[in-house]
Image (cartoon, coloured by chain):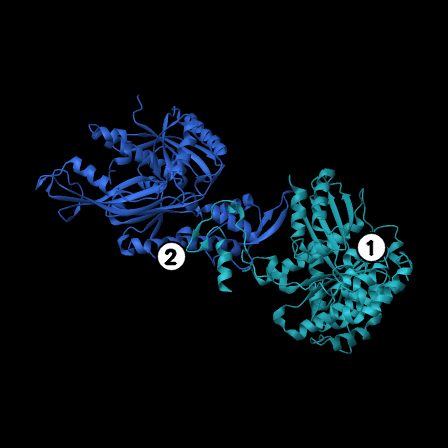
Amino acid sequence: MITYPKYLDRSETPIVRLVGLGNAGVNLADRIHMTHRLDIETVAINSDQQSLSSSVASTKISLGPLTTRGLGAGGDPEIGLDAARESLADIEAAVGGADIIFLCAGLGGGTASGAGGLVAEAAKKAGALLIAIVTSPFGFEGRRRAAQAAVALQEIGNQADAVIHFENDRMAELSAPRSGVAETFAGCDELLGGCLEAVVRLVSAPGPLGVGLPDLLSILNGGDGSCLFGTAAAAGDNRAHEALEDALKSPLLDHGRLLDDAASVLVHISGPPSLSLAEVGAVMQEISRKAPDHSLLHLGISTLQEKESPVVVSVIAKCGTARPARAPMPAPPARKPQPKPQQQPQPPAEDPAPPSSQEPLIEAGPLLEEKPLIAADPLPAPVAPPTPAPRPRPARTEPKPAPPKVKQETLQFEPVARGRFEKIEPTIVEGEDLDVPTFLRLTGKNR
Amino acid sequence: MAREDIHVGLEIGTTKVCAVVAECRQDGNIRLLGVGEAPSRGVRKGEIVDFENACSCVREALSDAEEKSDVEIRNVWLAVTGSHIESFNNRGSVIIPDEGGEITEEEIQEVEYKAKEISLPKENEILHSIIQHYYVDGQKGVLNPVGMLGSRLEADFHIIHGVRNRIQNSIRCVKECHIEVLDVVVNSLASAQVVLGQHQKESGTLVVDIGGGVTDFIVYVDGAVRHSGVLAVGGDHITNDISIGLRIPITRAEKLKIEEGSAVLGKSLPGDKIVLKNDTGFSGKEVEREMLNMIIHARLEELFSLLRKHLGDEVPQHLLGSGVMLTGGCSMVRGIREVAESVFEMPVQLARAQAVSGPTSAFENPQFSTCIGLTKYGQAVRSEMAEDSSLVHAIKNLGRFLRLPF
């Protein structure tokens, strides 16, 4: 299935193209283009002529001049899709020849939601690495838009190598609660622009530990398409700490918490020649603390010639536990918490894992016999696979239903800790142990 | 210049041991010469639980104080506290021998002796007996009956008592350092000496000294001690609550309480979070500010409610004309005044030592109220003693049997 994609065949810096789709997408692309001043080509695709004419993009495609007459899709994805079909040739021409395509779109409306899947497909067909930067609508924009956005996100996600997804509802985290709307939106665009810039820098900057497109691809492959992103720059004495700290603060990373779920993490550190190994070590140590043990860490380091340049730490991680088959190690721990799917599809028969081929047969037998029992009590299921010996199994299965693993809620008479007052004389006033935190006693009473 | 009348107050607190060296002038003014401090170990809820450790802390604090004040400390006034300390009011009465005779010092001594004739638990000892009012032939509100004529003298005393061995432990701890203990004074009484002026004592004030391990309180009404007590809840409890509630170590909780904590609810924006640094210096755990404040608020509100409930039986609200004075280290918690005001429903002030000169940083700090108060107490007792020096038993019993100038 893996052919030889075009982006592997590069001899020099990859060609990056920024595609803005729909009103929001064009705005975002414009803003990224203007603020980050990256040397990339910008393509604006929209069904709304007005938006196109004000865009700074070098290439502009008016979607479906016949379908929409340049008046926009009016929030209807069907119209957006029709318009995209009409202008498919233009789209294909615009995305052709690029190594990396960033597709910016604000989902939920008509154009981006309708045409998103098609544009993504065209970009993939052209052989580029497709990174979608999408926003989903605010909660207050209604359920219809949210539903349209969800569908479009899935369509794009199916095609894209990576989806950087920003929920507009989280915009509040970017700025102070009372700051202006324009400022908040600018902050959001800045965040997404930063992601884009980081990816471009990542694959193009030279360094002792370079990260190429293949590395990036291996991070972004698999999973459900959504990806975690954080980037920040800092200078000064404590630059490595500060940069990582700010990078982890990114709402796209949920303050580093989402790293818990990351299957693979790419960390790229770029800095001036004075960037020390100790700083890199400190950053990586912190990252590995936050990321799960089985996640695959990739490190890229690039040094810039300017002595004044700040240290920039970018963190890209892929969500989800689904991993390519070549990494068998993380699979068992990932599966453990979900015992049911392991049992129902009868994995031993399909699993290509090398361990003894007899096992599936043996396991299939008792499983079938026990089926009514297991169906009644799902808990013995996780116990079954790890028992390798076939003989003791029938003997064991008999008493198994007897000790039910159902968690019995016990009434706790001494429910709370007294902390540092554990071993000293309690202070009891009116029958209450005052050493127990007040708020705990209060919540107990309210129940 | 001879430094006459130097008093040293020593408090073995739950969070710190501190010693204050002060020069007491004849006019009643106190000048601080030095404050010695040492973080406390082996003390929980105001009582010693690890003798060795506590001793070394006392030694540390005293040598620190000696160094800073350039005074050699030989004897100290020692503050004691703990949940074992209790108090009550009792009346004693004596018949004046010859009908219509003059009341002399002797009768005064006797009536106090009578007032102290009460049944205490065996292990308890009276720490203070403080005169409230005299009654001469049923006439109320006599402040000094000496020289008056009457046939019957009665007196109300406020008696504070505690478990002898526990008090002895504190004394022994100091004696281990080869330092004499002049007398032991209950925390609240010592604090009140400096945070209250005569006016506040007259109009009625509740002094609440919230320390690390315990809360000492004392009520002055009409210039006399009406009520006092100890509640074994203090700043440590707040720290412990935070530690349990937010699942962070005690030291971190203490820092958070001091740096970020507030007892006022509803002031922080929703979602306002405090980021804690982990051991590598990166931001680790996040703590919701409102949660932190809620924990502090709950504890303080409960503490004040308990106090109010406790006082409600003994001291009617309307007697406290000057409201509530908060002191002690825990009174530095932000927003504590607002909480106290809402519970007590009367004006609350943050108090610190008054009528003291010396390093501002020391007497402005409510943590030192008790210690500075001890020196003032010492001065008061000494000056009384000078006056009463003719009385042999007065010297024998030191300040214990002496009236305090209220």
Query: Toward the viewer: B351 or A369?
Result: A369
Q: What's the distance in space between the residues labelled 2 and 1, CA to CA?
A: 62 Å
Which chain does the cyan colour mark?
A
Residue A148 as seen in the image, left or right of residue B25: right
Q: Foreground residue, B131 or A170?
A: B131
What residue lies at 46% left-to-right and 46% top-to-bottom? B235
Residue behind mark 2: B343
Q: Is residue A140 left or right of residue A11?
A: left
Residue pointed to by mark 1:
A218
Label 1 neighbour load within 10 Å: few <14, some 14-19, many 20+ = some
Q: Could you say where residue B281 lies in the image, as x and y percent from the top left?
A: 63, 43
Tell which residue pokes out farthest to the top in this image. Answer: B1
Dot 2 and dot 1 within a common chain = no
Identify the residue at horizontal 29%, vertical 53% (top origin).
B315
Mark 1 secondary-structure assignment: helix
Q: Nearer the viewer, residue A89 or B381?
A: B381
Residue at disc 2, secondary structure: helix
The chain letter for the residue carrying disc 1 is: A
